[in-house]
Amino acid sequence: MSKDRIGNEEEPEIIYIPDEEGNEEEFEVIMKFEVDGSDAKYMMVVPLDSSENEDEESEEVYAFRYEEDGDDLKLYTIESDEEWEIVEETFNTLVDEFDGEDEK
């Protein structure tokens, strides 16, 4: 597993994802990771407009499988329950590791 950005105080990565009507919405990438034993890469994003919400616990987090082709980023929704469980477990493990580092 690799942690690209978790816990770093660098400029946030912003991506634009079109909604059903084709309007582009801004999202902040909060984490990118790969799953052990797989070539698949995943990213966790939050809508930028929700960052104004004071209650971080209620913030919606979206997960996508992604591929990079040069400067192009292709996002794929996670559709299988099996894949979603792997992503959720990996995300929770990384968050727990990050929270543990904060307490030291």
Image (cartoon, rainbow, N blue to C red):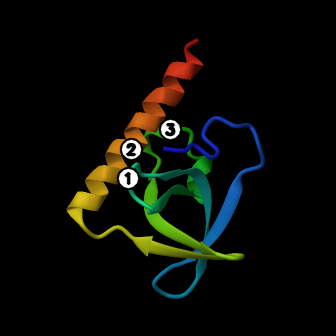
Q: Residue furthest left?
A: 81
Q: Residue at x 34, y 48 (%)?
A: 88
Q: Residue furthest top?
A: 104
Closest to the camera, between mark 1 and mark 2, is 1
Amino acid bearing label 1 = Gly
Is residue 85 shown above or below 14?
Answer: above
Using a 10 Å C-alpha cutoff, classify the residue at mark 2 as few (fewer than 14 neighbours), some (14 to 19) or many (20 or more): some
Instruction: Give the Cα separation between the discs numbered 1 and 2.
Output: 12 Å
Q: Position of residue 2 (x, y in %)?
A: 54, 44
Instruction: Give the Cα separation between the discs numbered 2 and 3.
Output: 23 Å
Q: Residue furthest bottom?
A: 21
Q: Which residue is identified by label 1?
A: 37
Using a 10 Å C-alpha cutoff, classify the residue at mark 3 as few (fewer than 14 neighbours), some (14 to 19) or many (20 or more): few
- Quadrant placement of the C terminus: top right
Whichever of callouts 2 and 3 sits on the residue coming sooner in the sequence is 3
Secondary structure category for the residue under label 3: loop
Q: Nearer the viewer, residue 71 or 30?
A: 71
Residue 5 is left or right of residue 67, and the answer is right
Whichever of callouts 1 and 3 sits on the residue coming sooner in the sequence is 1
- Residue 81 occupies quadrant: bottom left
Secondary structure category for the residue under label 2: helix
Residue 90's disc number? 2
Q: Nearer the viewer, residue 92 or 57?
A: 92
Using a 10 Å C-alpha cutoff, classify the residue at mark 1 as few (fewer than 14 neighbours), some (14 to 19) or many (20 or more): few
Is residue 103 shown above or below 41?
Answer: above
Q: Nearer the viewer, residue 39 or 67?
A: 39
Q: Position of residue 75 (x, y in %)?
A: 50, 73
Closest to the camera, between mark 1 and mark 3, is 1
Q: Which residue is identified by label 3?
A: 55
Q: Position of residue 39 (x, y in %)?
A: 45, 62
